[in-house]
Image (cartoon, rainbow, N blue to C red):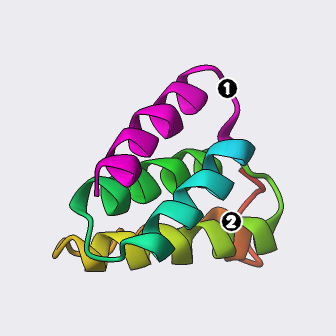
Amino acid sequence: MGSVHHGTYIVHALLEAGNAQLASHLVEWATRAEPGSRAAQAAKRDVYRQRHAEASALMARGIFRAAMNDAERALGEEPTVAFDVGMSLTSPRR
C-alpha cells in the first residue's frame, strides 16, 4: 500500500508541473495495482478531471470523462454530469 500511496504524491506533483499525460499513466498503474485505494482513486479522478478540462477533441473528452466517472464511483461519489457543448449540433464549440 505504501508505494501506491506515495505514487499519488508523484501524480499530483506531475499535475502541478503541467504533465497530466504522464500523471494519467502513473495513476492508471496505481489504480490497477490497488483498486481499493482511496488515494489512488482520488488521484485518478483529479487527473482525468484536468485532462477533460484541457482536451479539445470530443473523443478524448469522452474518454477522460468516463475515467473520471469510474474513479468517482469507486470513491462512492456521484459521477460528474455536465453538458458538453462539443456534443451538441446546435451549440457553438467550447
Residue 6's place in the image compared with 49, above or below, is above
Q: Is residue 13 magenta?
A: yes
Question: In the rendering, at what x and y percent does residue 32 appear?
Answer: 49, 75
Examine the rendering and report whether any part of residue 54 can be seen. no
Left or right relative to 37: residue 84:
right
The residue sitting at 50% across, 33% down in the picture is 10
Label 1: which secondary element: loop
Left or right relative to 61: residue 4:
left
| The image quarter in which residue 38 lies | bottom left
Task: Identify the amino acid type marked 1.
Answer: Gly
Task: Identify the amino acid type marked 2.
Answer: Arg
The residue sitting at 55% across, 44% down in the picture is 50
The residue at which mark 1 appears reads as 18
- Magenta: predominant secondary structure element? helix
Mark 2–mark 1 distance (CA, rounded to whole Å)? 18 Å
The residue sitting at 73% across, 46% down in the picture is 21
Q: Nearer the viewer, residue 90 or 84?
A: 84
Magenta span covers which residues? 1-20
- Foreground disc of the pair 2, 1: 1
The residue at which mark 2 appears reads as 61
Question: In the rendering, at what x and y percent does residue 79 appear?
Answer: 32, 75
| The image quarter in which residue 80 lies | bottom left
The residue sitting at 62% across, 66% down in the picture is 64
- Disc 1 crowd, CA 10 A, few/some/many (<14, 14-19, 20+): few
Q: Which mark is residue 89?
A: none
- The N terminus: image quadrant: bottom left
Q: Is residue 88 magenta?
A: no
